[in-house]
């Protein structure tokens, strides 16, 4: 649904964490090219801004985990100040899932500094001036994403989700 709503030439920057590991719907552009771009955990919002400036004709949508958002949310000030119409989806699961999955398999479930408290990312984004929605019921995901995509400025959807560290490490 998201790819269809973004038009013929979208861009989807995403971080290299658990959310980016093939768990999102794959979207190909009109020419058949992969429209996803991966970037490091602490660089997603910066990369997203670069995609918007480099491809001003494309709707840019970034999917990220709450860990990535927490690393880079200060970039929202720049996004708002510059009037960049970026769309963001944060999957809030209170864990650095990729790191926790690797600690589970590689270190015998000896976890260190991978779990954190729930943050209301929609309210954080609103404090910077970003139009935001928080989704706690899966039935509300489509409506929130459609509203965010229709908004003419920067928008964020904070989706409360379960932890995924019990799945395979994505790389």
Image: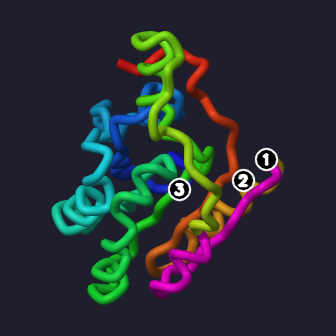
Circles 2 and 1: CB atoms closer than 8 Å: yes
Q: Quadrant of residue 57?
A: bottom left
Give the CA distance from mark 3 to mark 2.
10 Å
- Disc 3, SS: strand
Q: Determine which quarter of the picture holds residue 74.
A: bottom left
Q: Is residue 1 visible?
A: no
Judge by depth and name the residue closer to the eye, 48 or 95: 95
Sequence-earlier tag: 3 or 2? 3
Q: Position of residue 69 (x, y in %)?
A: 43, 58
Q: Residue at x 45, y 33 (%)?
A: 112
Compared with residue 149, is residue 110 higher up or lower down, i.e. above or below?
Answer: above
Give how far across and how far down residue 76 sits, in percent: 37, 75
User: Relative to residue 151, is residue 30 drawn left or right?
Assistant: left
Tag on residue 54?
none
Establish if 94 lies above or below 6.
above
Determine crowd level at label 2: few under 14, some 14-19, many 20+ residues with C-alpha closer than 10 A: some
* Inter-mark Cα distance, 3 to 1: 14 Å
The residue at 50%/20% (across/down) is: 110
Residue 132 within the segment the image draws in magenta = yes
Mark sitting earlier along the chain (3/1) = 3
Give the position of the C terminus as an image quadrant: top left
Residue 141, numbered label = 2
Tell me which colouring the rendered structure shows: rainbow
Q: Which residues are magenta?
A: 122-137
The residue tagged 3 is 89
Along the viewing direction, whichever of 116 and 59 lies nearer the viewer: 116
**Residue 61's x, y, as percent?**
42, 56
Residue carrying label 1: 138
């Amino acid at each position: 649904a998201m790819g269809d709503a973004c038009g013929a030439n979208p861009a989807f920057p995403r971080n290299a964490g658990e959310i980016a590991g093939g768990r999102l719907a794959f979207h190909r552009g009109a020419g058949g090219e992969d429209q996803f771009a991966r970037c490091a955990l602490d660089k997603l919002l910066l990369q997203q801004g670069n995609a918007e400036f480099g491809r001003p004709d494309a709707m840019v949508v970034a999917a990220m985990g709450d860990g990535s958002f927490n690393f880079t949310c200060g970039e929202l000030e720049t996004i708002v100040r510059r009037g960049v119409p970026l769309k963001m989806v944060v999957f809030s699961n209170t864990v650095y899932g990729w790191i926790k999955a690797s600690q589970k398999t590689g270190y015998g479930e000896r976890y260190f500094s991978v779990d954190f408290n729930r943050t209301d990312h929609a309210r954080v984004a609103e404090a910077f001036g970003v139009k935001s929605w928080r989704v706690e019921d899966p039935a509300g995901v489509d409506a929130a994403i459609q509203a965010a995509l229709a908004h003419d400025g920067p928008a964020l959807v904070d989706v409360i989700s379960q932890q995924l560290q019990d799945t395979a490490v994505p790389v």
